[in-house]
């Protein structure tokens, strides 16, 4: 598991960057745009890149063969570029330069996100992947805590400081990954590119996978909408300062982190499907209760409970998607996972922003609750329990 903890630095850098992006970029956009729906739309730029690039890059990385491995070349290209454009975002001089830097930063992130995620099942035995996903998401959650906690303090000093810190973390993480992860040595199941069976997308989209991906879509509809517009909800609906609103999200991230590793253990012990359903029901209740919160303390308690429930869902969902496929389709299935989450992130903030423009910020968590109900409907239709993690490519291994 040492390699898993080291790989966690990749997730740490991704999480801290996206958390800072979602927390503070809306404030930059707020000074140029008057409608929440437009801000929500602009916050989906990253997901348009993810929609088209991440499934393709995930599939391409399955076929890549270099002296650095299959995934690492994409990290070595994307991470330095992402660090550069993260720094430039708060240094924008106009609406046009802000959008340009946002687009270039998101393009760079899309280059290495799927390959980074796919590295986890590459270097982890199948029976340990749920636990490993808990570890790397623990690292990612720590990034979220720093983003909303320390990031809000740095932002209060100077809006550019959180982004400078994120860029430094990206570069340090890349250095750690390049030194510690050697794909040619560490990959568990190594199948020569010329011997890999041709991956057909239609074959991967069986009934179980489609139902699971649909459920993933709807819980990300809820989560992405809340994540993108919560800081504005806190500012305009609850009357919090920008710093206090961003800091409140720390409680969600903190309890996500605390429950990340236990969620992986629970998923392996009782089956991913059962644990995900428990998390969906719990997060529905939390989202339904937040509009009733009249104090910051109550809001933060509910966000803490929400973080625990989100851990039950998020820690188990990606290993679930991978475990019902083949070992040679890990990159492709990683791309499919990010395809549906990106579709949700594209659709959700603008739609939610439009609803808020018409009905006020109080409608945010009504919308989020509805998304969780739809997710619950589809995950209960999945028959696979997600408990078994048997290797499905013994014939491929035997041929190597």
Image: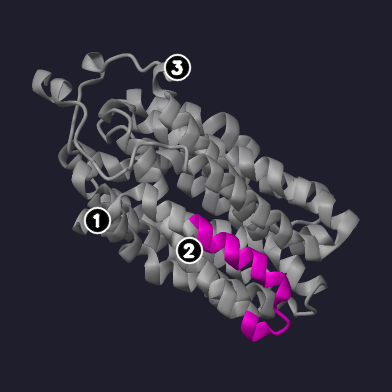
Label 2, label 1: how many angstroms apart (C-alpha)? Answer: 17 Å
* 66 is within the stretch colored magenta: no
Residue position marked by numbered label 1 in the rendering: 269
The image's colouring method is one colour
Going from N to C along the chain, the mark reached first, 2 or 1, is 1
Choose top left, top right, bottom left or bottom right for residue 172: bottom left
* 284 is within the stretch colored magenta: yes
Residue position marked by numbered label 2 in the rendering: 309
Label 2, label 3: how many angstroms apart (C-alpha)? Answer: 32 Å
Tell me what residue is drawn at x 90 percent, y 54 percent.
358
Label 3, label 1: how many angstroms apart (C-alpha)? Answer: 31 Å
Frontmost residue, 389 versus 72: 389
Q: Position of residue 74 (x, y in %)?
A: 41, 37
The quarter in which the C terminus is drawn is: top left
Q: Position of residue 179 (x, y in %)?
A: 25, 52
Tell me what residue is drawn at x 9 percent, y 22 percent.
398
Q: Find out whether the residues at labels 2 and 1 contact each other: C-beta distance under 8 Å.
A: no
Q: Is residue 292 found left or right of 113 in the rendered image? A: right
Q: Find out whether the residues at labels 3 and 1 contact each other: C-beta distance under 8 Å.
A: no
Residue position marked by numbered label 3 in the rendering: 202
Going from N to C along the chain, the mark reached first, 2 or 3, is 3
The stretch of residues the image draws in magenta is: 280-298
Residue 392 showing in the rendered view: yes
Q: Is residue 370 found left or right of 149 in the rendered image? A: right
Q: Is residue 259 found left or right of 95 in the rendered image? A: left
């Amino acid at each position: 598991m040492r390699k898993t903890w080291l790989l966690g630095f990749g997730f740490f850098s991704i999480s801290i960057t996206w958390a800072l992006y979602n927390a503070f970029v809306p404030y930059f956009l707020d000074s140029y745009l008057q409608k929440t729906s437009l801000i929500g739309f602009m916050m989906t730029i990253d997901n348009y890149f993810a929609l088209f690039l991440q499934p393709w890059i995930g599939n391409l990385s399955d076929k890549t063969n270099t002296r650095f491995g299959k995934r690492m070349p994409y990290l070595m290209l994307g991470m330095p570029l992402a660090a550069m454009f993260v720094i430039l975002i708060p240094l924008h001089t106009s609406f046009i330069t802000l959008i340009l830097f946002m687009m270039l930063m998101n393009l760079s992130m899309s280059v290495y996100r799927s390959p980074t995620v796919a590295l986890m099942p590459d270097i982890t035995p199948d029976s340990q992947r749920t636990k490993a996903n808990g570890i790397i998401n623990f690292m990612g959650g720590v990034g979220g805590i720093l983003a909303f906690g320390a990031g809000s303090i740095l932002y209060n000093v100077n809006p550019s400081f959180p982004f400078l810190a994120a860029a430094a973390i990206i570069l340090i993480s890349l250095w750690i990954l390049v030194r510690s992860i050697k794909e040619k040595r560490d990959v568990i199941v190594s199948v020569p590119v010329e011997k890999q069976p041709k991956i057909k997308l239609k074959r991967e989209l069986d009934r179980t996978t489609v139902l699971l991906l649909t459920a993933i879509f709807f819980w990300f509809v809820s989560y992405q909408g809340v994540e993108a517009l919560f800081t504005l909800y806190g500012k305009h609906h609850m009357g919090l300062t920008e710093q206090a609103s961003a800091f409140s999200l720390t409680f969600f991230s903190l309890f996500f982190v605390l429950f990340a590793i236990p969620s992986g253990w629970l998923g392996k012990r009782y089956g991913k499907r059962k644990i995900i359903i428990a998390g969906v029901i719990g997060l529905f209740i939390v989202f339904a209760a937040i509009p009733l919160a009249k104090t910051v303390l109550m809001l933060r308690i509910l966000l803490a409970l929400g973080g625990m429930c989100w851990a039950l869902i998020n820690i188990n969902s990606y290993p679930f998607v991978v475990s019902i496929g083949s070992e040679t389709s890990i990159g492709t299935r990683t791309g499919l996972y990010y395809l549906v989450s990106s579709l949700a992130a594209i659709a959700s903030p603008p739609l939610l922003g439009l609803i808020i423009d018409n009905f006020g910020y109080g409608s945010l968590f009504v919308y989020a609750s509805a998304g969780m109900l739809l997710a619950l409907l589809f995950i209960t239709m999945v028959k696979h329990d997600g408990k078994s993690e048997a290797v499905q490519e013994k014939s491929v291994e035997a041929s190597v």
